[in-house]
Amino acid sequence: MKHRFSHRFPLLPRHTCFFNQTRSFTHFTKKFQTSNAPPSSLNGGTGNFQGDSFLVPGATVATLLMLGVLHARRMYQDKKTEELREKGVELEFQPDVKASFLRLLPLRSISRCWGYLTSMEIPVWLRPHVYRAWGRAFHSNLEEAALPLDKYASLRDFFVRTLKEGSRPIDADPQCLVSPVDGTVLRFGELNGAGAMIEQVKGFSYSVFSLLGASPSLPTTADDNVQEEHSRSITTTEKSKKSWWRVSLASPKVWDPTLSRPQRGLFYCVVYLKPGDYHRVHSPADWNILVRRHFSGRLYPLNERATRTIRNLYIENERVVLEGLWQEGFMALAAIGATNIGSIELFIEPELQTNKPRKKLLHSEPPEERVYECEGVGRMLKKGDELAAFNMGSTVVLVFQAPISKQVNGVDSSQEFKFCVKPGDTIRFGEALGRWHSSGPS
C-alpha cells in the first residue's frame, strides 16, 4: 500500500520557529562569549542593548521560567506552613528520602549555572517588568531600591541591590545588638548545656563547634576571658588546623558551664533570609574581625522543609565564618550558602571565591582559613557597616557572648542580656535583636 501525503500541509516546514530560536540562541551565546564588555557592578549598570533590535535570549526565557517555578513552590510551602501554624502544630525533625536524593544531584554545578544565568545582562526595556514580577512573587519592597529598576543590568545586580539612605535606621543604643540582615528569626537562646548545641528544629540539634570550626578563641566556659586568651589563640592556629579532624559531628567539644561561675553567657540567633528579602549582611555591632574560615560543603536548600528533614543542614552546607571580638567578648557570624546561593561575596575580602569547581568534595578536610590580625589589627567594623552579600535568600547564624545576671548575696549585681524578638518574627537589618541593662541594687 502506498502512503499519500497532502502537499498542502508539509510534515516539516522549511523554516520552523524551533530552528529559528535555536539559531538565535546560538548566535547570542557566541556573541556573549566573545564580548569584551566589562562586568556590571553590584549597584547596577546601564547596558548597551537596544530595545528595538534586541531579541530576548533563551537564557532570559529560562530565567523567567525559573522565577515562575520558584514562585509557585513558595506559595505552596507558605500555605502548608501557615495551615500548621494556625493549628498550633510545631514541626518536628522527621528525616525522609529527600536528603538521599539531593546527595545525588550536582547542586554545586546547578548553583553555578544559576549564577551564570543571573549574571547575564537583561535588555533595558525588559528589566522593570522582570524585577516587578519578582517583587510581586516574593513580596519585595522595590520602593527601597537605591537605583531605578532599569539601572540593574542583571538579576544578580538586582538581588544584591543597595537601599535608599534612611531605609534601615540603626538602633543607636550602645547596649544593643542589632540584626545583621532582613529575615525571619528561626531560633535563638543561650548555649548553657553540655556540648553547646544549637537547635535546628524540634527534635534535632547540632554542635556550635562543628558549625564554626576548631576555634581556640571560642569560649568553652560561660565566663572565659576571650580578650586575654586571644593572643595565645593566634599562635596555635596551625595546631588547630592539624587537630580539625577531632571536631566532628559525632563527638563535639564539651562545654561545661559549671566549671566557672558565669558572668557572661554564650548566645546564638538564627535568621533566615527569604528570596524576596534584602540580601546584604551588615555588622551587628562594633567589632574587630580577626579570623575568616571558608568551609567547602554541599548546597542543600535552606527552606522550612529542609531544616526538618536534613540532618546537620547548616554544617553540611558551604559557609563562611567570621570570628572576632566585640565589647562583650567573643562574636562569630556564619553566612551559610544554599542551592542557587553558592556565591557568598565578602566585602572585606573581595578576592574570596566560594562554590569553586572541585573534583571531589571531602568534608573531613579543614576549612580554608585566613587570619586578619597578622596583617595589622584585624578588620574593624562599626555597627551597620556592610559585610557580605548573598545571591538570593540564605541563613545567618550569630554566636556571641553577652552579660548574664550573677547572684551576689542573693541580689543580681550585673547586667543581663535579653532578646527582643520571638521565633517567627520578621526583623529588618538595624533593628534590635537583644539588649542588656543594669539590674544591680540601687
Image: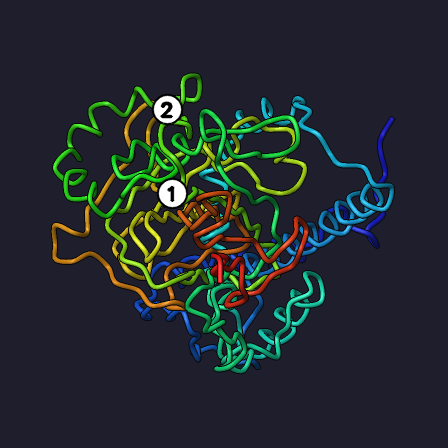
Residue 373 versus residue 162 in the image, above or below: above
- What amino acid is labelled 1 in the image? Asn
The answer to whether residue 53 is seen in the rendering is no
**Local SS, label 2:** loop
Q: Residue at x 34, y 32 (%)?
A: 220
Q: Which mark is residue 355?
A: 1
Residue 208 versus residue 382 in the image, above or below: above
Q: Looking at the rendering, which quadrant does residue 17 occupy?
A: bottom right
Q: Residue at x 36, y 58 (%)?
A: 33
Q: CA distance from mark 1 to mark 2?
A: 28 Å
Q: Residues within 10 Å of mark 2 (few under 14, many from 20)?
A: some
In this rendering, position of residue 335 left or right of residue 23: left
Q: Position of residue 18 (x, y in %)?
A: 65, 53
Q: Nearer the viewer, mark 1 or mark 2?
A: 2
Residue 260 versus residue 85 in the image, above or below: above
Residue at the extreme top of the image, as rendered: 250
If you read the primary sequence from the N terminus, does the residue marked by circle 1 or circle 2 appear first? 2
Q: Position of residue 406 (x, y in %)?
A: 45, 44
Q: Which mark is residue 243?
A: none
- What amino acid is labelled 2 in the image? Lys
In this rendering, position of residue 217 left or right of residue 72: left
The quarter of the picture where the N terminus appears is top right
Q: Looking at the rendering, which quadrant does residue 305 occupy?
A: top right
Instruction: State the residue in front, 34 or 214.
Output: 214
Q: Residues within 10 Å of mark 1 (few under 14, many from 20)?
A: many
In this rendering, position of residue 401 left or right of residue 114: left
Q: Position of residue 440 (x, y in %)?
A: 47, 57
Residue behind mark 2: 253
In this rendering, position of residue 185 left or right of residue 42: right
Badge 1 vs badge 2, beta-carbon distance below 8 Å: no
The answer to whether residue 269 is seen in the rendering is yes
Instruction: State the residue in front, 53 or 36.
Output: 36
